[in-house]
Amino acid sequence: MITFEGVSKRFPDGTVALDDVSLECATGEITVFVGTSGGGKTTALRTVNRMVEPTSGRVLIDGADVRDRPPAELRRGIGYVIQQAGLFPHRTIADNIATVPYLLGEGKKRARARARELMERVGLDPALAGRYPAQLSGGQQQRVGVARALAADPPIMLMDEPFSAVDPVVRGELQAEFLRLQAELHKTIVFVTHDIDEAIKMGDRIAVFRTGGKLVQFDTPKNLLAAPADDFVADFIGYDRGIRRLSFVPAAELELDDRAVLPENASVAEARATGADWVLLTDSGRRPLGWVAVSGLATDRSLQHMPRAPLGHTFNVRADSARAALDAAVLSPSGLAVGVDDDGVVVGVASPLDLTNAIGRESAR
């Protein structure tokens, strides 16, 4: 556990970076620091490894003041991941990852073997071990940065906007990969971001900071969205926080309807009998093929020969949230979201009303 006890940081020019911050980062959880520029997020994170010394207050790791240990010794037991990876350009990928094991006196052969294991764990091809950082993409470099932070198996990891320098697609992949790793490793993590969506996705608990280093609210993502502490937090989260709460509603709880799901050889009469404006056509294995608009169809023809609108994308009723269903509905030409099982078989469709009802149920909890 990492404990902040009345931590303040004031610089000689009078700037207040942290103002009497007290909170606990629970063992085995991800605590996210988020807030405005100048809110003290990174300053707070750096007090943990003594890259910043507080003006007053204490930072404790499992009850022990971090100031009781030499900075170099303290930092060797804490993984540190920063924006744009911060790799050594003149070292190979394997040697970058093995940096801390080398400092701890581990032999090169063993350290490099460990580096290759970690490369696989973070989704990198071990064949890249002999390359240099400049030969890797930005996303690959960030994965190396995570692997390096894990190399000495530290109980604590500090992550300062680690995924902000890559494009949105790679960022999503890195977030998912890291959450998968955390489910296996259960590290105690402090994660800094300026992105509230990333905070909600990554955090077990979220600390919201305001300019001047003031901690405004410290709560679970669900509670943060449901009950912002004040207008500042509400504005920071955004007007669409009700939609964001769908992230905490499992898609399995949605009431799906399959009346408008038809095999592709169904007739126009069958489509009209559903009473729906659109019908979803499926193949013989009940996998989705596309949408057909019912209005204007000739009654003497099979749906198999009718023009189809693209499917859009689907959501997994077992693994996804209702937020994924909302995204699917928004991008669907029919305005309906297609729910499938793990094998891609259609379970049913969700309408905007179904999703609105899901928000209402979540709000009532």
Image (cartoon, rainbow, N blue to C red):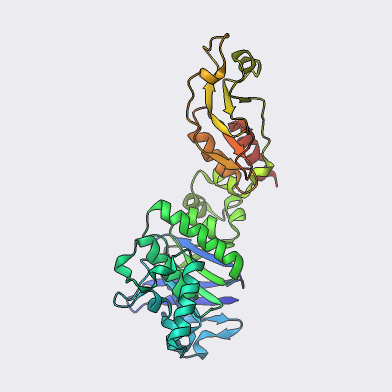
Outermost residue toward the right in this view: 365
Residue 70: image location, x then y, percent: 46, 91
Q: Nearer the viewer, residue 7 or 174?
A: 174
Residue 286: image location, x then y, percent: 63, 32
Asked whether the viewer can see residue 148, the reply is: yes
| Residue at (45% x, 84% y) in the render | 109
Residue 348: image location, x then y, percent: 64, 33
* Residue 134: quarter of image: bottom left
Q: Quadrant of the N terminus?
A: bottom right
| Residue at (62% x, 43% y) in the render | 343
Q: Nearer the viewer, residue 58 or 317?
A: 317
Circle count: 0
Up/down of 333 relative to 122, above or below? above
Up/down of 298 relative to 221, above or below? above
Q: Nearer the viewer, residue 249 or 177?
A: 177
Up/down of 173 relative to 50, above or below? above
- In the visual, does 301 lie left or right of 80? right
Asked whether the viewer can see residue 54, the reply is: no
Up/down of 191 relative to 322, above or below? below
- In the visual, does 241 lie left or right of 171? right
Residue 108: image location, x then y, percent: 43, 86
